[in-house]
Amino acid sequence: MSGIWKNNIGLSIFGESHGACVGITMTGVEPGIELDYEFIQSELDRRKPGTSDMVTQRVESDKFEILSGVFNDKTTGAPITMIIRNENMISRDYDGIKDRLRPGHADFTAKVKYNDFHDYRGGGHFSGRLTAGIVFAGAIAKDILLKKGIQICAQITSIGPIRDDELSDIITLSDFENLKDSFPVVNDLKKGLMKKAIRDAKAELDSLGGTIRCFAIGVPVGLGDPYFESFESILSSLIFSVPAIKGLNFGSGLKLATMKGSEANDAYYIEDKIKTRTNHNGGILGGITNGMPIDFSVVVKPTPSISKKQESVNFESMTSTELQVVGRHDPCIVQRVVPVLESVLALTILDRM
Amino acid sequence: MSGIWKNNIGLSIFGESHGACVGITMTGVEPGIELDYEFIQSELDRRKPGTSDMVTQRVESDKFEILSGVFNDKTTGAPITMIIRNENMISRDYDGIKDRLRPGHADFTAKVKYNDFHDYRGGGHFSGRLTAGIVFAGAIAKDILLKKGIQICAQITSIGPIRDDELSDIITLSDFENLKDSFPVVNDLKKGLMKKAIRDAKAELDSLGGTIRCFAIGVPVGLGDPYFESFESILSSLIFSVPAIKGLNFGSGLKLATMKGSEANDAYYIEDKIKTRTNHNGGILGGITNGMPIDFSVVVKPTPSISKKQESVNFESMTSTELQVVGRHDPCIVQRVVPVLESVLALTILDRM
Amino acid sequence: MSGIWKNNIGLSIFGESHGACVGITMTGVEPGIELDYEFIQSELDRRKPGTSDMVTQRVESDKFEILSGVFNDKTTGAPITMIIRNENMISRDYDGIKDRLRPGHADFTAKVKYNDFHDYRGGGHFSGRLTAGIVFAGAIAKDILLKKGIQICAQITSIGPIRDDELSDIITLSDFENLKDSFPVVNDLKKGLMKKAIRDAKAELDSLGGTIRCFAIGVPVGLGDPYFESFESILSSLIFSVPAIKGLNFGSGLKLATMKGSEANDAYYIEDKIKTRTNHNGGILGGITNGMPIDFSVVVKPTPSISKKQESVNFESMTSTELQVVGRHDPCIVQRVVPVLESVLALTILDRM
Amino acid sequence: MSGIWKNNIGLSIFGESHGACVGITMTGVEPGIELDYEFIQSELDRRKPGTSDMVTQRVESDKFEILSGVFNDKTTGAPITMIIRNENMISRDYDGIKDRLRPGHADFTAKVKYNDFHDYRGGGHFSGRLTAGIVFAGAIAKDILLKKGIQICAQITSIGPIRDDELSDIITLSDFENLKDSFPVVNDLKKGLMKKAIRDAKAELDSLGGTIRCFAIGVPVGLGDPYFESFESILSSLIFSVPAIKGLNFGSGLKLATMKGSEANDAYYIEDKIKTRTNHNGGILGGITNGMPIDFSVVVKPTPSISKKQESVNFESMTSTELQVVGRHDPCIVQRVVPVLESVLALTILDRM
């Protein structure tokens, strides 16, 4: 396990769901940035558990503690380390399933890879709880970018079968206004249906997934390089670091596969500067940002932890078994993934600038 | 521009479409591997231009020349460098469009990023021709993996609106038998329709995109790590290095967004070893391979080079202009992307072993 | 500032001398290693301040706290994060010299590089105190190596003008027996003279440097690669990460410059396995370990913090000034560098295995 | 074998002494740099063999061929690949010693590490001939730095027992004037003695080593970072990539070990800008350049290839043997290492800017 992402910005992630803490070290941040602790905490709060009946009832204050890299509330240029102590662990929930593999989880692969020394409680190091560190780093990145006129936002485009209204091909700041909610859906009716669907899934001891579309406006032309350091390559390596994400599509995504070249090509025109009439390429051409909004969508799989009975295997005895995941889970994590996704986009942009 | 990918395997890509050559240096290959030159050439031939009326008429023999790292036909452990000399360049095709930005291409972003010093002829370093190096490295990787019982294959799942039959959720080696063609489509009728669609698009001076599903069978449990070195992260960073790829979805991909957890979770059972009843997760859980087939799909956008008239901008004069891309282009590159995609999958697996 | 070293083993260092803590995240450690907390603490104690009148009187217990990566006292394979809380800071010592540049320190370069946002107290992130994290990681590495029959040791070869007896060209485990002291010098008379020299320097408000020779026995043939990942390259990048080290010489070092080839070449012979009669190359040929003891020496410059009056400059007013560094300093840090040096050697060996 | 160095500048080295060529790919060079082919060739000529009776009689024109990254004689920003074809190989020289290990060479370590698949002819990939690529990249770096007012130079400070006059602690551009020779020694008498010593060693079928002091003037304050990316760490990783280098000492080097703090500390004063009275730290404090000349020395071991009879071992038969290295060797490579050393310094500075 490396847990280290090293480019111009460096990220070193650590911690376990039921261990002492989760945390991150972030490097490469310029000195003299005044940290907005309230904003950072509000970003962490968007991700934290226990905030509604649609997410896990594990109650964590998720108060961050900065251990290094900040002096007189400003970044020093040295590595910034942050930890969040774990508080509300109920590890006995996991005793009964220690050797029974939870379908859809990393239990099996972790057991094989780490010879059964893995901390299985709550997913241990594999837990989505680790993304709190990414949100912390992302909040710092967002704040720096905002001062340079770059804004980031996301829309929950679907939860299970319920789809939100489709926004325009070329997203604008006015679209952002409608996405300021912690559950960012533009059509309120759809939002209600989505929340109902989540509650229904919970009642059925089941879970839901969904899709998220994420944007950045104000990104300069020229970030990224062809081939191995394309903007898409770097962003994708971070996006697929986020647990539960199984798909990533830029711009018009899957629709591009059925378009003709004459439709898919974004025509150039001049309006103050060079722009494109459409944004089917999601703001990236040849691996390099073209000044149009960065625009991509991800697929979030339904939470694997469900209380329904599932067919499984006992890894120790190598026998068939059944399993119901007790304890507290999210019937849907899509809304909690939103700030994580915005964070990795912010980190990618900052990294390439 | 970095052009270097450095993990356990290293790749250093170089060259231009109308320069002296395209090539690659591959590092980290174990010593003593006997190179199968015929196989390597056959893989390059799958990608090379000029082979049918459905691809560009640029005729290149694409004969590779190994400059280093091989002694007595075996790898030595030292970096392997390979070049393919360019032969059939018609650079004057590009004189007329030197300053006019081809929509959908990297012309604009390259001009801004490289201050107009970029070799614009045929896309220069951005050309898909550079992927020949990736196919060379991939052929070596495939050969090594085959000896370890790992096989890789791909299916063209759609060209424009035409979709091939859907294969089973859990792919098997017998499926591979039906995909041995240079245009790997299982339903012959659909294959014919696809080829016709490509020829039609060409006749209309237009182009088509499509989707490709790619598989690996025999991959051991345990490749990849959580977070930044997840199997998906590493593979995606290579996949989004391939020009024209705009989407990547693992396992059931977009369908996962509408499934319930009880449907999406792959139930475990024992049959000789631990397996899953379904493979919605595409052979990867928690960023680590689980022994089921690796299974993912990509979106290939339609070739941006089309002879239809397009709205554009002259970068020098900053005026509106129109443009028809003359010269030789592919009406569809999906079939040429197939070996590139198989190659990056092979390279990711080899890298993680 | 990166603070990240990423190879097979990863190190992410953080903290400040007068901040909350110093610490490190170590990645790439195999799962299932039972940590020997006593050994780790004893290694940290070799480096910690306040242990005698020859080092700084800052009293720190240097008790380590493991935050992640360990479950049931065994490594899990996940990143291991360790912090040591700072306890005995007297930051006012640094108020008076905030803007006056301490000669030989990083004050000037840090002020320029970090725009004066640097935490200047006690050297901040530049403090040698950060090496506690390296010693922690090194202790884990040493423990793993010991189980594989690899032992590491060091000799203080000189303090100021006093030189210890020269050990043989080919070091043996019996030499290690004489180097078990926290002040590892083989000749007791010389050891006494060295300690006296340090106390004398302290009395004169001055400081001393010295040289350390460091060894590893039992290292297998084949670690390292030619060129950029030579064993020397990797080791040197870690050694020159240690503050105050200004020279590194392998094997016979400077003497090699005056030897003839016939003298410098280590002749091969067979005794059970292939060995060399001499070890002028320090156990490394062509960047690769050859099975002979790894053997190198470093130069440690005298501690720059001295209480003697020095000529300097006030960075704010850009005027000449004089300065006496008050507060608690080490008259000599050579003995405290010993465990750090052993640690980076252990980490390099572990990284290449 | 990695052969890849990846920082802001990337280097990918390849080739063999008796294979098709040696070469390098250099990435990260800004677009629009007009390449001075004559200067590049003159730098390669300083390193090339066969130029006098003091070096190997292998005659190579060492004409470089640029394969990529240059368009209209200017860099494009894409990877620059250069090869030098090998011409004057006499591989039969190596037939007799195929299995007999040449002392001081990488024969033994390469055989073990690469399972005997290594190209043994002339050292194969381990050959110092590979450094031609480094000199090519270094020439480009030097040219870019010169335009920014940064100049690099070196002095042969000793050959065997003969030492050149010691230059001042703080080197100046006027010192550079006396070091413009391909055999840069300031005292002509000493230069004559050195050359005589080399010829004498050759007559005795033996070889000599030496020391080189290397400088850069005009380097801005602020290059490098504390710990793992200290200027010393990065430079040292490149320097110990150069075959035959066994020691590296910054500033006053070994003398620092016997100085007191009050002597070793470089006092600050103001003369237009902040300077130091002395330069014992070699222009680097806390891992960061301080604006004073970069100043370091290396130890070059005597060429291991000597025609004198040596004790050795036959690796195949595992028996004792004797060996005389026939063929063409350098009785001394110190003067050929000079441009390589200047190159890695230039590359480090360019990388950190």
Image (spheres, coloured by chain):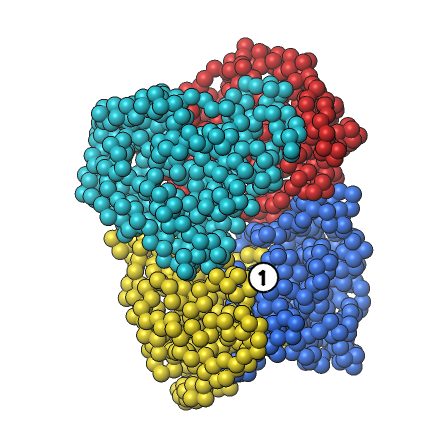
Chain colours: A blue, B yellow, C red, D cyan
What's the residue at 24%, 32% (across, down)?
Answer: D53
The x, y position of residue D242, in whole percent, is 40, 38
Q: The C terminus of chain A appears in which quarter of the rendering?
A: bottom right
Is residue B58 found left or right of A265 in the rendered image?
left
Number of numbered tags placed on the structure image:
1
Is residue A106 found left or right of A75 in the rendered image?
left
The x, y position of residue A350, in whole percent, is 64, 57
Q: Nearer the viewer, residue A85 or D334?
A: D334
**Residue A212 sits in quarter:** bottom right
What's the residue at 65%, 54% (across, down)?
Answer: A124
The x, y position of residue A59, in whole percent, is 79, 59
Q: Amino acid at mark 1?
A: Leu
Which subunit holds the residue at mark 1? A
What's the residue at 67%, 49% (across, down)?
Answer: A30
Residue C268 drawn above or below residue C163: below
10 Å neighbourhood of mark 1: few (<14), some, or many (≥20)? many
What's the residue at 65%, 67% (across, down)?
Answer: A304
Residue C237, visible in the rendered structure: no
Residue C199 drawn above or below residue D51: above
Residue A271, visible in the rendered structure: yes
Q: Nearer the viewer, residue D176 or B173?
A: D176
Q: Nearer the viewer, residue D226 or A45?
A: D226
Residue for badge 1: A223
Residue C240 drawn above or below residue A63: above
Is residue B3 found left or right of A65 in the rendered image?
left
**Residue C314 sits in quarter:** top right
